[in-house]
Image (cartoon, rainbow, N blue to C red):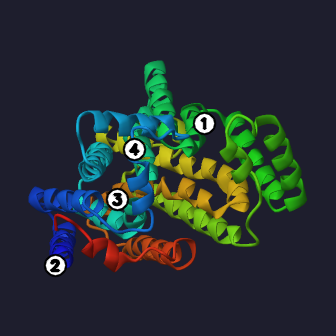
Amino acid sequence: MSILATVTISVINIYNSIRIRHKKIPVILFIILLGLLMGANTKNPDFNAYLFAYNPNRVGSDFGYSLLVKLFNLIGFSYSSFRITISFIGIFLISKTVNKFVKNKSAFYILYFIYPFIVDIVQIRNFLVMSILIFLSPYLLTDKRLDKVKYILGISIAATIQLTAIFYIPLVFITKIRKNILYKIIIIMSTLMIILISVNKPLLNEFSRFVIMQFGDIDERISVYSKIQTNYGFLLLWILQSISYFLIIWANRIFKRNNQLLNTEESNSHNIVDQEAEIEYKFLTLIKWINILAFFFFPFYVFQITFSRLMRNIMPLNIIAFLIAEQTLRKNRKRNYFFRLAFVCFHLILIWIDLRFLYPNINIYEIITNNWIL
């Protein structure tokens, strides 16, 4: 039943994505399917660990998640009810940003389903962090201080669910970086320096010792995650992040070329022909700088492959950026099949690498078929 429902709804949405006019019902069905596949799943590599953690008396290191567990236990939710509720909450948060920028919503959910949805089913705490990040990303488009405060507070809350969310707090400075040439130079030079430091493992080891000595007593996980545990596998993540960056640059250029900018300088983005395109352009620029700042994650990939989630969490934002650029091609009836094919193939490669090398214990068939609702 679950396989049939997944295949049927996916095919319907693939057809809906290539139509000139997109219907809403297939999208709604796909959102429901995603929520059920994640929320009603009963077998994945982390299922028993999450089931064990659903204990109101358990003291967890991520107190925000522990608070959620206590709250849902207090109102009488079983783990199954808890899981399906937070799954739909996460997907709802993602959909709020998707609805603001994407017309071809079927295409978004298809690409998201390819990657990283299957891994999200397993790592549901990280899924919540990713959902909050995507929901908050539009606040980074403005110069309003209140929006910056909302973003920082939201990410801080996400960090109580999973600590790695704190790595996304510096994104709040993107509006300043993209408007100031000095900041741009500093970021580019810092990125190059970080890459050079990252390939020097003895130097990273010294940095690791310093971090453990200064902050190891605050949280025991700092001592664990600050030890280099890779050989050369981190190079694969470096390559993937670099490809992701160049695809976003490609999307930016396609958008600018097809929206007939009066001035191609980023600082003059207000000269774009219409207001909708201006907002879309700002979002594309935002995603470009998020991918630039993602190069700062390079040293962490050297420490542990588990930090690959830092890159994975921005992939739905990259999908939105791709579809914004793709929408301009449709609007102008232009056929850039190579751009579309490159992005889809990259997503297929990402899920293949995750299942082949990073998470070989994830079985897609078992995840889809073991479901108490479908």
Give the class, few, some or many, for how many residues have Cα within 10 Å of label 1's Cα (few <14, many ≥20): few
The x and y percentages for residue 168 are 55, 41
In this view, the mark in front (4 or 1): 4
- In the rendered image, the quadrant that contains the N terminus is bottom left
Circles 3 and 4: CB atoms closer than 8 Å: no
How many angstroms separate mark 3 from mark 2 (CA)? 28 Å
Give the spatial CA distance, label 4 vs label 2.
35 Å
Can you tell which mark lies on residue 170?
A: 1
Q: Residue type at mark 1?
A: Pro
Which residue is identified by label 3? 323
| Nearer-the-camera pick, 250 or 31 | 31
Please report contact status of discs 4 and 2: CB closer than 8 Å, yes or no: no
Q: Earlier in the sequence, mark 4 or mark 2?
A: 2
53 sits to left or right of 174? left
Q: Position of residue 30 (x, y in %)?
A: 19, 62
Q: Identify residue for label 2.
A: 4
Which residue is identified by label 4?
55
Rounded to the nearest angstrom, the CA distance separating label 3 from label 1 is: 26 Å
At horizontal 48% and vertical 75% (from top left) the residue drawn is 361
Q: Amino acid at mark 3?
A: Leu
Sequence-first disc among 3 and 2: 2
SS category of the residue bearing label 3: helix
> Residue 289 at what x, y percent from top left?
56, 46
Q: Name which of mark 1 and mark 2 comes first in the sequence.
A: 2
